Image (cartoon, helix red, strand yellow):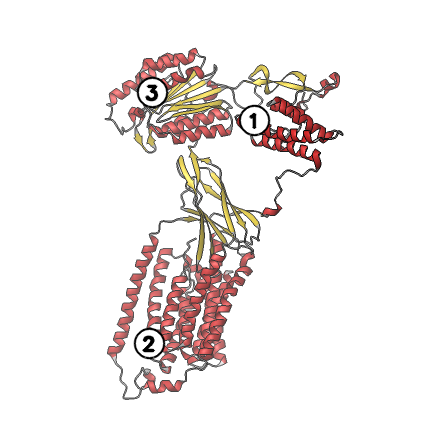
């Protein structure tokens, strides 16, 4: 899954460069192919460098990553604010070239930190430049950035989640990809179509020419009357540098606050048991008494309810016991018990007719016995089930 | 795993910036990007919660363990929802472990109306005492890992950690024989040993495996074999919970020594198959009646890890009160927490036990050597003098005994070869 994530990351980096350059510098097909090959090679080198970065102490690596990330963030924010505030094709072309060049560095350092925020941020900055052009290209840039970024963080999340819990990611990769696509693709399509509907035309470079009179003019396009203003350049550099330092220290402060979190979480390797089917409520084995027909059935029913009642109070019938043996073991109330046992044996095993008196005696007797037992202290009778039995001992 | 996505904050900030830039510059694509991100976040909230629909979890764990044990805790996940569950995280709090939470992943698929048992191994890292396990919580991420939703199952299971025990070798020579069945110490009465006694008529309830077929064939009616009864060596531990025995703090306290030594003594008795019981009187009376099985040992251990030295009754009084209930042949261990006792009374108690054919053993924790907590320290000379007097008394009575001080840990004491073997100071 990590390989797949790397491919998606490469596509994001390439898409960003392609969109930005197509929007502002108009590259030929060969130039685009060159970018594709170049970024691919650089990313492979960057992935290889990852193993070297691992040897650096984690704390130092984090500090270096934070420092470089802060500088990068400051530059990107500054560039984007300038670009958005003053729509100037020349400036945007200049920024596109600069940021595309930096993209190579960002790809090279992709594994400096555990999370490639630098590369994603750089790519999104280039995408933002492309979005400023508007039209179908802007829509594509926004939609593809959303889709590829979402897909990457989805794959990266699953990879991290599985690795953290020591689960082999191989069987889960297709599902992770499918889950991520299922969420990301509709949103990306929706955004792309929506943006095209709202802004179908690209911004013409002509309207910017008018604004160019008072706006930023790159040095190479300035006439002789344009002079280099060192104060403005100094202000930009100082503001960028000051902003970078401020962001760096704020970031450190925030990180320090999060490190104070005392929770420690262990992710032991799970031992997965067998998958079992849950029996729905309706399909569970019924504990209700079986139904018997006629007077004979009512007597059997009464006797079985007596057995169930006796079991509930801790005096179950043993598997080998006959009705008479059970009555002898239960003992009380002697007369009633003997009567109901005798009627039950006749009803269950005999051939004589069962009268209504017999039924009434059995049902009344069963209730009487249970009422008697409920007034007695609970009894604990041990029953040895067949499953517990051991092979017979033949030693003597 | 941290439940906070490392990408969420970063990308949300990027989306907000993109939205602002889009509004400022009139670029709908940037606004669309920000809107798309907001939509992904909303979908994430929904999807993460939806992932938990129909899922039920419960924990299965034994009620106790010894220090340092490696336990298997089962988490049963049941899916009553309509769709298969995937990537569900079950987080549990195992109080006796060092980590705050234990988190296991069910990567799935867990189909509808199915259950799966996920087990994790937890190390009992904390000391003896009472702990809780739980609450258990089930959690799920959205597909992009941006939002984590969890549902807590507010059930706490009590969990007891027993002290690590050591088998005391010397006790085997002091009382009944080892528990390995069959025992050769039997009584001439019908019982459960493997020593053959005779045959008799079959009675209702007799095990059919005991039918003696040759005798049955000769007599024409079922006959069963009968065996002699095992002699059950009885064992009782009298634990001193008198508040005057309190001294020391934490692992170097008399309570620690009492509990650890008491646990090992009970464990040894259980391993030998003795019918063991525990008697103590702290702020409440503790009386674990005689019993032999593992559940009984767990009950005794349960009482042991809950004891506090808040009693006001001397151990000798407690022993005298229970003496007449002890069957002859019993081994009685007196675990004293205070050597500063009336030696005459001790002599009478020990001789009284012997009069009832009870074999007394004494383990005395020398409280005066521990840092005092609620009394002024005893001068060293006085402490030494009292200790020597106790030792001499035990030697005179010829009672196997050990006097334990803070200069060695309970584990070291229990591993000593002369522990409870001879009167203190006598040659082994």
Q: CA distance from mark 2 to mark 3?
A: 87 Å
Q: Which mark is residue A82?
A: 2
List the residue tagged with mark 3: B314
For residue B392, what is the image quadrant? top left
Q: Chain of mark 3?
A: B
Eye-nearest disc, 1 or 3: 1
Disc 2 residue crowd, few under 14, some 14–19, many 20+, Cα 10 Å: some
Q: Which residue is mark 1?
A: A372
Determine if residue B208 is in view.
no
Q: Looking at the picture, do discs 1 and 3 lie on one chain?
A: no
Which is in the foreground here, disc 2 or disc 1?
Answer: 1
x, y (%) of residue B71? Answer: 48, 40
> Label 1 to label 3, Cα distance in Å?
48 Å
- Label 2 vs 1, first from the N-terminus: 2
The chain carrying label 2 is A
- Dot 2 lies on which element? helix
Relative depth, front residue between B272 and B422: B272
Where residue A226 sits in the image (x, y, percent)?
28, 86
Image position of A175 (left or right of A48): right
Instruction: Tell me the crowding category of disc 3: few under 14, some 14 to 19, or many 20 or more residues within 10 angstroms, Cα based.
Output: many
Asked if the residues shown at circle 2 and circle 1 are in contact, with their CB atoms under 8 angstroms apart, the answer is: no
Disc 2 from disc 1: Cα separation: 95 Å
């Amino acid at each position: 899954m990590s390989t797949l994530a790397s491919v998606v990351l490469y596509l994001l980096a390439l898409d960003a460069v392609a969109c930005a350059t197509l929007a502002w510098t108009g590259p030929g097909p060969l130039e685009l192919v060159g970018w594709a090959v170049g970024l691919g090679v650089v990313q492979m080198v960057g992935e290889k460098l990852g193993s070297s970065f691992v040897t650096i102490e984690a704390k130092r690596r984090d500090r270096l990553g934070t420092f470089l990330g802060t500088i990068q963030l400051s530059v990107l924010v500054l560039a984007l604010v300038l670009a958005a505030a003053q729509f100037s094709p020349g400036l945007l072309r200049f920024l596109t070239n600069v940021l595309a060049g930096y993209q190579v560095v960002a790809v090279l350092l992709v594994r400096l930190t555990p999370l490639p925020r630098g590369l994603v941020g750089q790519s999104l900055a280039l995408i933002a430049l492309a979005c400023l052009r508007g039209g179908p290209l802007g829509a594509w840039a926004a939609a593809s950035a959303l889709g590829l970024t979402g897909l990457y963080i989805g794959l990266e999340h699953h990879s991290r989640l599985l690795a953290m819990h020591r689960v082999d990611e191989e069987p889960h990769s297709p599902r992770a990809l499918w889950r991520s696509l299922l969420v990301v693709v509709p949103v990306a399509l929706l955004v792309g179509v929506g943006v095209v509907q709202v802004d179908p035309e690209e911004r013409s470079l002509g309207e910017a020419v008018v604004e160019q009179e008072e706006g930023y003019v790159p040095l190479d396009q300035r006439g002789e009357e344009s002079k280099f203003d060192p104060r403005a350049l100094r202000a930009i550099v100082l503001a960028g540098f000051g902003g970078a330092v401020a962001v760096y220290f704020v970031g450190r402060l925030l990180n320090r606050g999060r490190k104070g979190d005392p929770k420690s979480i262990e992710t032991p390797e799970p031992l997965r048991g067998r998958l079992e089917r849950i029996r729905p409520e309706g399909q569970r084995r019924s504990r209700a008494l079986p139904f018997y027909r006629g007077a004979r059935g009512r007597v059997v029913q009464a006797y079985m309810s007596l057995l169930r009642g006796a079991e509930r109070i801790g005096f179950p019938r043993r598997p080998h016991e006959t009705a008479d043996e059970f009555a002898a073991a239960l003992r009380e109330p002697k007369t009633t018990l003997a009567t109901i046992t005798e009627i039950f044996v006749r009803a269950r095993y005999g051939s004589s007719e069962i009268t209504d008196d017999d039924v009434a005696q059995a049902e009344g007797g069963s209730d009487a016995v249970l009422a008697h037992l409920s007034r007695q202290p609970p009894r604990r009778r041990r029953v040895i089930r067949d499953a517990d039995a051991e092979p017979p001992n033949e030693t003597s | 795993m941290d439940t906070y996505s490392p990408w969420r904050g970063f990308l949300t900030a990027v989306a907000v910036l993109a939205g602002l830039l889009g509004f400022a510059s009139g670029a709908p694509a940037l606004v669309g990007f920000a809107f798309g991100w907001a939509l992904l976040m909303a979908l994430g909230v929904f999807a993460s919660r939806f992932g938990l629909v129909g899922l039920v979890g419960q924990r299965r764990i034994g009620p106790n363990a010894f220090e340092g044990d490696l336990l298997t805790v089962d988490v049963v996940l049941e899916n009553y929802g309509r769709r298969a569950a995937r990537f569900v995280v079950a987080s549990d709090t195992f109080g006796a472990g060092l980590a705050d939470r234990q988190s296991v992943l069910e990567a799935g698929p867990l189909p509808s109306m199915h259950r799966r048992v996920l087990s994790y191994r937890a190390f009992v890292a904390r000391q003896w005492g009472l702990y809780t396990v739980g609450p258990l919580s089930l959690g799920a991420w959205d597909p992009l890992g941006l939002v984590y939703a969890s549902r807590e199952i507010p059930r706490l299971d009590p969990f007891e950690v027993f002290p690590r025990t050591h088998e005391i070798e010397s006790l085997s020579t002091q009382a009944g024989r080892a528990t390995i069945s069959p025992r050769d110490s039997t009584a001439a009465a019908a019982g459960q040993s493997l020593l053959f006694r005779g045959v008799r008529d079959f009675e209702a309830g007799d095990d059919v495996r005991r039918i003696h077929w040759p005798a049955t064939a000769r007599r024409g009616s079922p006959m069963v074999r009968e065996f002699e009864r095992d002699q059950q060596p009885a064992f009782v531990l009298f634990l001193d919970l008198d508040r005057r025995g309190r001294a020391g703090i934490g692992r170097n306290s008399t309570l620690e020594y009492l509990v650890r030594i008491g646990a090992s003594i009970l464990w040894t008795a259980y391993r030998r198959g003795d019918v063991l019981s525990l008697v103590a009187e702290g702020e409440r009376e503790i009386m674990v009646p005689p019993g032999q099985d593992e559940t009984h040992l767990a009950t005794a251990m349960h009482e042991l890890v809950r004891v506090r030295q808040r009693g006001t009754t001397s151990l000798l009084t407690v022993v005298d009160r229970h003496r007449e209930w002890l069957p002859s042949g019993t081994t009685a261990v007196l675990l004293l927490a205070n050597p500063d006792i009336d030696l005459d009374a001790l002599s009478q108690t020990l001789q009284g036990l012997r009069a009832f054919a009870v074999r007394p053993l004494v383990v005395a924790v020398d409280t005066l050597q521990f840092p005092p907590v609620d009394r002024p320290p005893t001068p060293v000379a006085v402490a030494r003098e009292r200790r020597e007097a106790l030792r001499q008394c035990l030697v005179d009575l010829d009672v196997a005994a050990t006097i334990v001080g803070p200069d060695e840990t309970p584990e070291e004491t229990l591993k000593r070869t002369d522990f409870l073997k001879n009167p203190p100071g006598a040659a082994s």
